Amino acid sequence: MYWGSLSEFLEMGGYGLYVWTSFIITALCMVWEILALWRRRAAAIAESRGIVRDIG
Amino acid sequence: MIPWFGTVAALAIAVGLYIGLLVAPTDFQQGEAYRIIFVHVPAAWMSMFLYVVMAVWAAVGLGLNARLSFMMTQAIAPTGAMFTFLALLTGAMWGKPTWGAWWVWDARLTSELILLFQYAGVMLLRTSIDDQRRADRASGVCALVGVVNIPIIYFSVQWWNTLHQGASVSMTAAPKMATVMLTGMLLMTFGFWMYSLAVILSRARCVILERESLQLWSKPSSVAEVAGVR
Amino acid sequence: MSRPGLWETLRGIIWRDVLLAIRRRSDVAISVLFLVIVASLFPLGVGPEPAVLRTIAAGVLWVAALLACLLSLGRVFTADYLDGVLEQMLLIPQPLPVLVAGKVFAHWVVSGLPVVLLSPLLGLQFGLEGEALGMLVLSLLLGTPTLSMIGSIGAALVLGVRGSGLLVALLVLPLYVPVLIFGAGAVTSSMAGIGGEANLSLLGACLVLSVFFAPWATASALRIALE
């Protein structure tokens, strides 16, 4: 383990703002993409089920 | 397949983060700011790699007239654009403390920005053409033409004397960075790669479903078939 | 009646397009006028300081020329697409990329060449002189055909698509960037006394590459648009 304490870890030698913003935004983008995909998939499945029920 | 890739991605990213944030020592030149490398470099690699993969699918689709490969190009583009955006954003976060500026007009940054516009162009061209077949083929040609930018991005740090540092890893020379850092970075890259596979494959499934529904609306006779399959 | 050969067909296509453009002079005039207006806006916006104007001259004039070229891209195929001539052209039993190259060349003659011919005048407005002025003309002469070639791919891709004007800008502008960099770089470096030859040869390379590859891409894009 490289860090002495938690606050040291969060500070990142004075660069905390930059480092943590990068990591957090990356994580947010990925989570958002997964959620969006999940919703899209649900919508697509509902749509095709609906058509099959309506017409067939 | 998709959950499998997802699990591997989560594991690799978790271990990569552990190594990158907790184990790896500080860089004696750049201080702790260098830790951005663990997201910046994998995102930048993926942005270029995914574009090439997208263009290959487009070429296959145009050459063999295969609908499935166009669905793959459609599924890849958003993820590629997201990684391009992330590479630019984390690059800005890195540039501010080390160069003193969020953005500089150097060759690497500019060509990566152009890549973002290319992704946007491919996606917008697809959405603005109503005819499915034409949309597929036109955006495929567009993706293929844009491939010229990839070598420009990759070699920009060698061809021009830029502010952006040279490649940290190369296939031929011994790596210039410590093994711990390298391990962390490669693990993150592997994780991002697996993540892309999971996301792209599941988006491809959505695309297939959506197109199937669209076809059903226009061709009710095939309902029985599809209903039978499902 | 014997079938016309490739060369005659090509000459026919080029001559027809040039003739059409001459008959409809206002189209050509608009893009030239646009160039002049854009170039004249900058001294008004930045201020008439001669030293400042000279430093931005290369970039401003090149960007203006690039936008003028972009503005005229809609005319390469649209009219022929609407009246069905393009469909007939696809049926000509000659290699389509060559015919496309002819069409793009004709387009350059009526929209790119006027820009090149006008550029020394605009360069003088910005205080360029001597070698730099010559370099501006030379770089535009090498660069504008490349712009037309690359632009034709975009123009063919968005043929008949809604919102095509903005879309073509998004598709084509990223690919214009290298031409812009080398073109403006040639003028800037000749002003700095380094000589713009290196940038000129890069521009030449871009031109050769685009002449070689762009007609293929444009031809396949046209086939997609018309099938």
Image (cartoon, grey):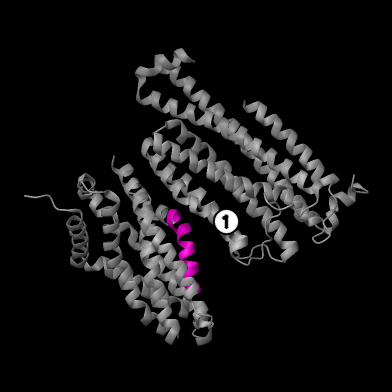
Residue that appears at 24% across and 46% down: C90
Tell me what residue is drawn at x 51 percent, y 27 percent.
A44
**Nearer to the camera, B141 or B3:** B141
The answer to if C184 sits in the magenta stretch is yes
Q: Which residue is labeled 1 in the image? A: B153
Residue B99 placed where, x, y %?
72, 65
Q: Main secondary structure of the magenta part?
A: helix
Q: Is residue C23 left or right of residue C39?
A: left
Is residue C96 shown left or right of residue C197? left
Q: Is residue B61 above or below residue C87?
A: above
The quadrant where residue C32 appears: bottom left
The magenta span reads C170-185
Residue C47 vertical position relative to residue C29 in the rendered view, above or below: below
Task: Say which residue appears at 35% left-offset and 74% top-offset.
Answer: C116
State the residue at coordinates (49%, 15%): B230
Residue B197 horizontal side relative to residue B190, left or right: left
**B25 magenta-colored:** no
Q: In this orientation, does residue C121 appear?
A: yes
- Amino acid type at mark 1: Ile
Pick the quarter of the image with the C terminus of chain C: top left
Q: Is residue B214 above or below residue C76?
A: above
What is the x, y in percent for residue C123?
41, 81
Task: Left or right? Give the position of C151 relative to B162.
Answer: left
Towards the viewer: A3 or B191: B191
- Element type at marker 1? helix
x then y, percent, for residue C140: 39, 72
In which quarter of the view is residue C173 placed?
bottom left
Please name whichever residue, B132 or B168, is drawn nearer the observer in this view of the structure: B168
